[in-house]
Image: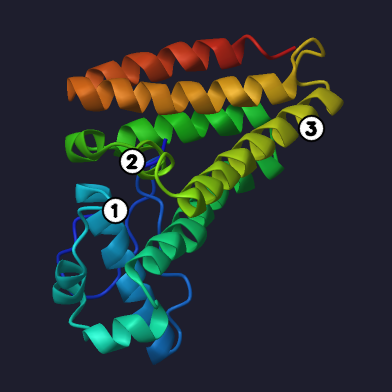
Amino acid sequence: MTTATKTNNKSARAPSRSLGRFWDCVRCNRPSEATRQQLLAAAFEEIHRVGFQSASVSRILKHTGVTKGALYHYFPSKKALGYAVLDEMIRQGMREFWIEPLQAGHPIDAIIHTITEAGRQMTLDDIRLGCPLANLSQEMSPVDEGFRERIESIYAEWRDGIAAGLRRGQEAGEIRRDVDPDGMAVMIVATLEGCLAAAKNAQSHELLMQCGHALIGILDDLRT
């Protein structure tokens, strides 16, 4: 569940992290890299709000103050820009938000903390926009193989990261041995995405929290 920032200036800024707000300008240490990251951040927000096919290069340029020539210097096409948003922003955000916290401590505690923190941070605007990864999956996977492959690889990495954490918990005696880590990881990711999709349609933070609490109850039952 992933989840956009409201751009109040022309530069990329580090937003609060949640399941749907998980991008960052982490390599803005050189002027040329800063420009590229500005474009990625603005493109992410534009795509998240209106979808890739309706995303406007002109609006992206207006938000950043970058020229069209500079944009095409970094990204040869609008599609290449969309691919980069997936590869560099959404994927990295998923790693930081989901996988890294599972590398230490009790994996169930880490997953529950992430779910709780995401629900706390998520605004109604975030819920209305929905998960950026799920949005792109629904819009672009049926029509573009490059998008579909990238989206699936991100989902696979997310599932694999959760499964690895669950296996580590089993080895530490913290998670029941009868739990199938791979199957449980599929269920967790699907449930999180389903929770946000249902909340998006209902435009309800309450429904999101209700679904999240139910998932937390299932996770608690995995403990030894």
Q: Which residue is mark 3?
A: 168
Left or right: where 9 falls relative to 223: left
Q: Is residue 186 visible?
A: yes
Distance from label 3 to label 1 (Cα)? Answer: 38 Å
The residue depicted at 66 percent of the width and 31 percent of the height is 107
Disc 2 residue crowd, few under 14, some 14–19, many 20+, Cα 10 Å: some
Residue 88 lies, in percent from the top left, at 49, 63
Q: How is the image coloured?
A: rainbow
Instruction: Kindly identify which residue carries mark 2.
Output: 139
When the figure is inspected, residue 157 is found, relative to residue 30, above or below; the finding is: above
CA distance separating discs 3 and 2: 35 Å
Mark 3 is on which residue type? Arg
Q: Position of residue 15 (x, y in %)?
A: 32, 57
Q: Nearer the viewer, residue 210 or 85?
A: 85
Mark linked to residue 52:
1
Q: Which mark is residue 28?
A: none
Is residue 101 visible to the viewer in this orientation of the structure? no
- Looking at the image, residue 14 sits to the left or right of residue 94; the answer is left
Q: Earlier in the sequence, mark 1 or mark 2?
A: 1
- Which amino acid does the dot numbered 2 rest on? Glu
SS at circle 2: helix
Q: Amino acid at mark 1?
A: Phe
Badge 1 marks a residue whose secondary structure is loop
Q: Which residue is depicted at the point 56% across and 39% down?
A: 155
Q: Which is nearer the eye, 221 or 158?
A: 158
- Residue at 62% x, 48% y: name it: 100
Q: In screen coordinates, is 166 left or right of 108?
A: right
